[in-house]
Amino acid sequence: GEDVEQSLFLSVREGDSSVINCTYTDSSSTYLYWYKQEPGAGLQLLTYIFSNMDMKQDQRLTVLLNKKDKHLSLRIADTQTGDSAIYFCAERTKGYGGSQGNLIFGKGTKLSVKP
Amino acid sequence: DAGVIQSPRHEVTEMGQEVTLRCKPISGHDYLFWYRQTMMRGLELLIYFNNNVPIDDSGMPEDRFSAKMPNASFSTLKIQPSEPRDSAVYFCASSLAGVGYNEQFFGPGTRLTVL
C-alpha cells in the first residue's frame, strides 16, 4: 500500500537553511504536499507541487520533486525560530469512483531552530 | 469564515464511557475527513465523506468507532466504549471538490484522554 517516510527530527541554527526529506511510494500521486503543524494546533498547508513539476519556489521555501526516486524535499532558507514546528509530507491517493481521494501523511519531521 | 470548528477541545473520560467528538466543516466544502494523531502511529485517516456520504472507512480501528454526517455542516465521531488506547488528538478537516490541489483545512483538534 501507499507509504510516506520522513525523518523524525531536524535541528538547525537560526539563519541556516533547513532541508526536510521525504520518500513516497505511489507513483501515480498527482499532488504532493508539505503541511506545517505548530504546537497545539491543526495542520496547515505550507506548499504543494504538481507531479509534472520538479521544482517550485515560494519565497523562502523551495520544493524539489524527483519522481524517478519518489523523493520530495522542502528547503527553508534563512530559517527563523518561528519556523520551529512539525512538517508533514503527504501524497494524494486516487479516489474511488470519481471521488477526490485522500492524503497519506508521513509521521512528520520536528524542526528545532536554535538561536 | 471561522474555519473548521471542533468540539470539545479537550475531553477526559473513563474507560468504558461513550465519547462523541463534533466537527463543523467550512461552509461549502464537499469533503470531510477524520484523522487521529498519536506519537506512535503519526496521523492516520479514519474515515472521509463526500457530500455527506462515507467514501472510505477502512481506517476506522474497530466497531467501537462510528462516524456520521447527517448534513453538510455537521459530523460526529463516536467511540463506544472508549479504551485507554484511544487516547489521541482527533482532527477533522474539510476540502472543496474539483480539479486541483484541493487543500485540506484542519480544525484545531480534540485531545482525548481515556483513563
Image (tube, coloured by chain):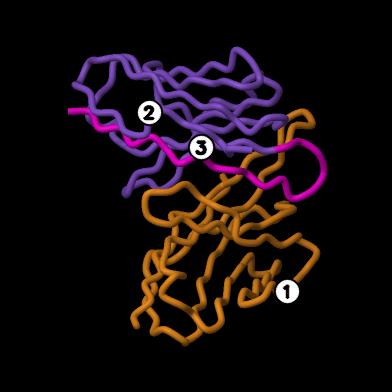
Q: Tell me if A34 is positioned left or right of A97 in this view.
A: left
Q: Residues within 10 Å of mark 3 (few under 14, many from 20)?
A: many
Relative image position of residue A56 (x, y in whole percent):
72, 72
How far from the left and from the top, in percent, is residue A101? Answer: 68, 38
Secondary structure of the residue carrying numbered label 2: loop
Quadrant of the drawing holding the N terminus of chain A: top right
Residue A20 in the image: x percent, y percent?
50, 72
Query: Does the magenta portion include B46?
Result: no
Location of residue A4 in the rendering, given as x and y in whole percent from the top left corner? 53, 55
Q: Is residue A20 above or below residue B52?
A: below
Marking on residue A55 = 1
In the image, what residue occupies the spot 64% across and 62% down? A47
Q: Chain of mark 3?
A: B
Q: Which chain is purple?
A: B
Residue assigned mark 2: B8
Q: Of the residues shown, which amino acid type is indicated by label 3?
A: Leu
Magenta segment boundaries in residue numbering: B96-115
Q: What whole-number distance in Å separates the C-alpha atoms at marks 2 and 3?
A: 20 Å
Report the Cα–Cα distance between label 2 and label 1. 40 Å
Secondary element under disc 3, as helix, strand or loop, is strand
Marked residue chain, label 1? A
Q: Amino acid at mark 2?
A: Pro
